[in-house]
Amino acid sequence: MKKFIYIIFALITSLALVSCGSNSTTASFSSPNAKVAVSQAAAPKVTVQSVLAAADKGKYREGELLVKFKSGVAVKTAASLHQAMGAAVERRFAAVPNLERVKLAAGMPVKDAIVRYMQDPSVEYAEPNYLRYPKDSVPNDLYFNPQQWALSNIGAFAGGTAGADIKMPQAWDFARGSRGVVVAVIDSGVDLNHPDLVNNIWKNGGETSCVDGIDNDNNGFIDDCVGWNFADGNNDPTDNLGHGTHVAGIIGAMGNNGMGIAGVMWNTSIMPLKFITDFGPDVCGPGADFCGSVADEVAAIQYAMNNGAKVINASFGAGGYSQTEFDAINAANSAGVLFIAAAGNGTLDSLGDNNDLTPVYPANYNLPNIISVAATDQNDRRATFSNFGPNTVHVAAPGVYILSTVPSTGVSMSFSSMCTDSFVAGYDFCAGTSMAAPHVAGLAGLLESYYGQFTPAQVRATILRYVDVLPTLQGWIQTGGRINAYRAVTSLLPPDGLSASAQSSGAIKLSWTDMATGESGYKIERKAGSGDFVQIAEVAANTTSYSDSGLSASTTYTYRVRAFNTIPADSLYSNEAAATTSAGGSDGTNGGGGCSVGGRLNGPSAFGDTMVMLAPLFAVFVMSRLRRRKK
């Protein structure tokens, strides 16, 4: 009898221990190809600590996990573990056997889920679903590198310095423009059929025909399908100089189309408004053939305002304060239109002038929608010809050896003062603050397209705040800096992957990924049930979590977060995340895996735990029976 009792005890204990491990069923994970498995490179040992350490260094999707089970683990065992975790399988991967992407239970932090999954002996590893970003969006345009050093300077053009550029490839990872953003080019016109511009030319949808002689949209201009020629009073704003086409290409030559160049905006709507033409020296003065009048310029500004332009590029200027010009630009300000103006090229021995002392208009008007732009070279130095002014010139942008579009035919005058003649038919290098301004206009359009909620004042302030301050510019211009498209575009990226997790009956913890590069902090908003969102807190820059306390028990709270800065401007909102506080008392989570007791386990594991708990009691019972027999 004694021997029989010991046998029974041993069997029960063995069953208990087996139940704590993986189930063995006919359906299990296994490698579909043994030869492939043998040839795979040996991976470093994965531990909970190594996974959590890696998670601290990367960005990943909240609410998701990649879980790899050990070879031979039963499918039912994996499913039971997911069920215990409140998770659901979203995808399996043939290339990596036994790997599953799972969606975690609402409010379950990724790091907590990693710990719980990796406590289970059937799990080989569990790790975040990391985010990966393109290194830099370098377009395939034929002359992008190294000729377009202004956008991406690799130090291989004209003795330039690597990095002395406006960081466009990095900015293009996030924003490439939109056809919905209209940029007016008030200049000498634009080559409407240039292959690098034709698809980015503004189209007036209100005109049903371009040749019917009818003002279909009743805007006062007949057949103005693609802008207007104010110099000649007709609907053909074709460029007969080349200056306006060069400016237009810097702003919005089509990017990544395998030809020519890339504009700051790959996608935009360039509105050609011609007011400069070949009036000759009788009108323009000795030695000058091309010019335009303030009256025609003002008419063009009015057209841009009334037909949806968000940004005006003004790569022109001269002396002589004009109240009419001032009033027109001020009206554009009231209409929410930014006005980007070239600071001008010096007239004294090819050296720049001080605009604080010798004003150039329209750049020098003290209006809140004007950005006055100086020029830099390929080494981040102020171009020797560029005007300056610590009070009146706001920012700098590249303006030397700038390759852009020019008409391939019909140019009636060579650019003896700033261009080299055509490098390739349809493209040419030019220099001047006329070339610097459209880099800023393009960036303004890029910000308009990406931060649709920004006001013109916020776009302007973003451009001026997020510059690269340079010793060569400090003391010469107001910001002391050259524009940085990447810093401006990413300054207020919204937080990513917001998650909410109930900690108790009165507290919820929030976590998110910090994406912004120039935030002052984060605003946190909350709503209870179906109520309205209200702001409950502000936290400092670079913060990625917040604990909300003093909440009601058994209540669902929803949160959203956005970045802010002191411009002042706010980012778009993060995703919304919700969690429900517990009914009362303390809230805790229990680990799973192995033979831990009290956690949410699958059926066989729960049976095993129960047997382990009962084994000591059974042993006491057996020993008691043996003692009685001895008596």
Image (cartoon, helix red, strand yellow):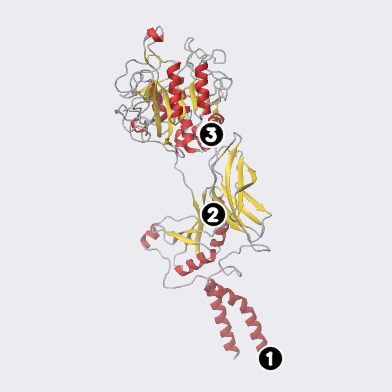
549 over 74 or under it: above or below:
above
Q: Residue furthest right?
A: 631
Tell how many labels. 3
310 over 106 or under it: above or below:
above
Q: CA distance from mark 1 to mark 2?
A: 55 Å
502 over 360 or under it: above or below:
below
Q: Position of residue 608 (x, y in %)?
A: 56, 75
Q: Which residue is mark 2?
A: 51
Tell me the SS state at disc 1: helix
Q: Is residue 568 visible?
A: yes
Q: Position of residue 281 (x, y in %)?
A: 38, 8
**Quarter of the image that includes the C terminus:** bottom right
Q: CA distance from mark 2 to mark 3?
A: 43 Å
376 over 200 or under it: above or below:
above
Q: Which residue is mark 3?
A: 455
Nearest the viewer among 327 and 341 is: 327
Tell me the SS state at disc 2: helix
Task: Select label 1 or label 2 by which is in front.
Answer: 2
Task: Select label 3 or label 1 by which is in front.
Answer: 3
Q: Residue sitting at 53 percent across and 30 percent down?
A: 460
Amino acid bearing label 1: Arg
Q: Is residue 372 visible?
A: no
Q: Identify the disc placed on residue 628.
A: 1
Amino acid bearing label 3: Thr
Q: Residue sitting at 32 percent across and 24 percent down?
A: 426
**Circle 1: is it few (<14), some (14-19), or many (20+) Cα within 10 Å?**
few
Q: Identify the disc placed on residue 440.
A: none
Q: CA distance from mark 3 to mark 1?
A: 91 Å
Amino acid bearing label 2: Val
